[in-house]
Amino acid sequence: MSVQEPRKPVLPNAVLGTLFFVVAEVMLFSGMISAFTISKAGALPGTWPMPGQPRLPAEATALNTALLILSGIVLIVAHRLYKSKNPVAHWVTLASWALGTGFVALQGVEWWTLLNAGMTLKSSPLGGFFYLIVGGHALHAVIALVALFMAWVKMARGTLSPGFFFGTQTFWYFVVLMWPVIYARVYF
């Protein structure tokens, strides 16, 4: 009687765990965006946003959005290079990280500008929802950037496991794909 080798899982554990986490986070953001949409739809004419509150900089945020989407595309390229064992993969991964970091930095500038213009968590329902939803996304982006940086370091050292890299990518793609939904619903 021969002993069978255990079957490798279809998805690495890091990816499966990340997918479960992402599904829960999609539900969280769906709830927040739904509450925002209902509040905005139920506001009396002329009260959303409240008079005297700054308008969200939708045009300027389009640049942030482009940086984030480009970061996701660059990470797809990095993954393909990594799979083919191309030594350039770690530089392309770093480029994806840098683009994502640029997104977060520009979001920080946007927040600073809005705070200085008087929009706070308590200044209006728009301010409260804005900082809750966009801030939640920013927190996820920062955590994903830390993971992506760790993947880059491991890749540069030659110790990156495919499961860790794929799990990190899965989380980063969630951040990238969630943002256009947030941008379209909150900024317009």
Image (spheres, rainbow, N blue to C red):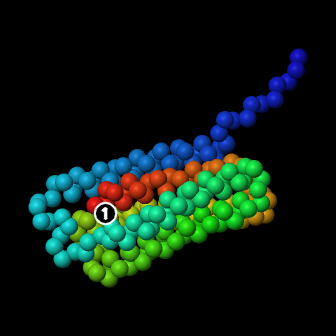
Q: How many marks?
A: 1
Q: Residue at x 43, y 58 (%)?
A: 179
57 to 44, vertically: above or below: below
Quarter of the rendering containing residue 77? bottom right
Q: Position of residue 69 (x, y in %)?
A: 49, 59
Q: Quadrant of the N terminus?
A: top right
Residue 99 visible in image: yes
Instruction: Tell me: 131 left or right of 175.
Output: left
Quadrant hosting residue 49: bottom left
Viewer-proximal residue, 188 or 8? 188
Q: Quadrant of the C terminus?
A: bottom left
Residue drawn where x is 44% and y is 54% of the image:
178
Residue 146: percent from the left, percent from the top? 60, 65
Residue found farthest to the top? 1
Which residue shows up at 76% across the image and 64% down it?
156
Q: Circle 1 is placed at which residue position?
A: 187
Q: Residues within 10 Å of mark 1 (few under 14, many from 20)?
A: some
Front-most of 62 and 13?
62
Q: Is residue 164 visible?
A: no
Percent x, y of residue 36: 27, 56
Residue beneath the point at 21% across and 57% down: 40
Q: Under tag 1, what secondary structure?
A: loop
Is 43 left or right of 88, judged from the image as shown?
left
Q: Give the image location of residue 147, x and y in percent.
A: 62, 61
